[in-house]
Image (spheres, rainbow, N blue to C red):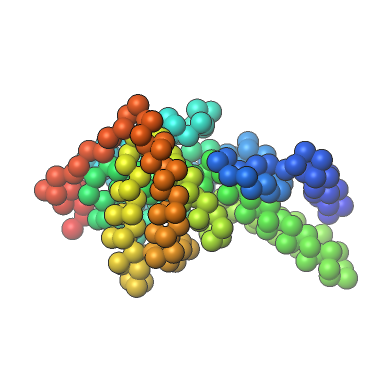
């Protein structure tokens, strides 16, 4: 079994070298992927089904409408009409959001404490969707596999059972692994372009990350622990802003971004 996996991976690497690997959308970066898109979507769906069983879905109409409106607009310009898009709000005091491979998007209620309008919500949603369309989940799984197999090759004993356990864990939970800094800045860049293309003013992303960054010292927020420091992030976004503004000017839906009534928003948020 170990030999089969090694052979498949070597084959993958050979094919990768011959074909020039997979290129990340909007970026020139190429990388090795050991997973197929359908495998990644299956992992994403498994993770989604688990989340639906273990977490409380919010039925609040205000928060759900906002997410569907924003998520739908971003998904429409993502170039992934083949994804099985779904948008759900979860009741939680953790300010977090994600998009699983295949297009399942979850936003936690506490995140809305930092959004004053759809454009600010679009900042987070497009960042998360960018992770999915750039296939960062599949890349993390592939990196984990290579590390595991590398360790197995280095060890004198080829303990195939241990490799299989690690292989199982990597493919099963890989979709939920934290992203690296490189993936984070790539998702910031691609997300910025997506929100601009959809018609949301990309400059609103700065307003959102400033508010969110002010809370960074708070231990409550799991989200920021795997995400870059606010100042670095804002500098990165400002550098890419001219490119995003060009897309925004060309967007047929330029000017999108319902502003939330503070009264409605506070009524919708958990006390
Ligand atoms: Zn991220």
Which residue lies at the image location 29% right of the left edge and 54% below the top edge? 207
Which residue lies at the image location 45% right of the left edge and 57% below the top edge? 236
> Residue 100: image x %, image y %?
50, 45
From this viewpoint, is residue 222 visible?
Answer: no
> Residue 165: image x %, image y %?
71, 59
The residue positioned farthest toward the left in the image shown: 263
Q: Quadrant of the C terminus?
A: bottom left
Query: 188 or 42: nearer the eye?
Result: 188
Which residue lies at the image location 30% right of the left edge and 67% below the top edge? 214
> Residue 215: image x %, image y %?
31, 67
> Residue 26: image x %, image y %?
55, 41
**Residue 12 left/right relative to 118:** right
Query: 54 or 167: nearer the eye?
Result: 167
**Residue 39 left/right relative to 60:** right
Which residue lies at the image location 38% right of the left edge and 49% below the top edge? 124
Query: 144 or 31: nearer the eye?
Result: 31
Query: On the image, which quarter does residue 16 sit in?
Result: top right
Query: On the image, which quarter does residue 86 sit in?
Result: top left
């Amino acid at each position: 079994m170990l030999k089969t996996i090694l052979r498949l991976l070597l084959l993958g690497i050979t094919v990768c070298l011959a074909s020039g690997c997979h290129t990340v959308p909007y970026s020139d970066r190429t990388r090795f992927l050991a997973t197929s898109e359908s495998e990644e979507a299956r992992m994403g769906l498994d993770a989604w089904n688990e989340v639906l069983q273990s977490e409380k879905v919010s039925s609040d109409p205000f928060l759900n409408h906002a997410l569907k409106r924003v998520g739908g607009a971003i998904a429409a310009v993502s170039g992934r009409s083949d994804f099985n898009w779904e948008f759900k709000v979860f009741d939680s005091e953790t300010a977090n959001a994600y998009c699983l491979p295949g297009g399942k998007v979850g936003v936690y209620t506490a995140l809305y404490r930092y959004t004053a309008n759809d454009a600010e919500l679009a900042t987070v949603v497009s960042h998360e969707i960018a992770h999915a369309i750039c296939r960062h989940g599949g890349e993390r799984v592939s990196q984990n596999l290579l590390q595991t197999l590398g360790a197995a090759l280095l060890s004198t004993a080829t303990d195939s059972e241990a490799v299989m356990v690690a292989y199982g864990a990597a493919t099963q939970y890989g979709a939920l692994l934290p992203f690296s800094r490189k993936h984070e800045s790539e998702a910031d860049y691609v997300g910025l372009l997506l929100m601009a293309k959809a018609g949301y003013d990309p400059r609103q992303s700065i307003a959102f990350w400033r508010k969110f960054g002010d809370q960074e010292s708070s231990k409550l927020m799991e989200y920021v622990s795997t995400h870059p420091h606010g100042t670095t992030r804002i500098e990165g976004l400002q550098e890419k802003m001219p490119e995003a503004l060009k897309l925004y000017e060309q967007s047929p839906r330029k000017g999108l971004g319902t502003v939330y009534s503070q009264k409605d928003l506070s009524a919708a948020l958990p006390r």
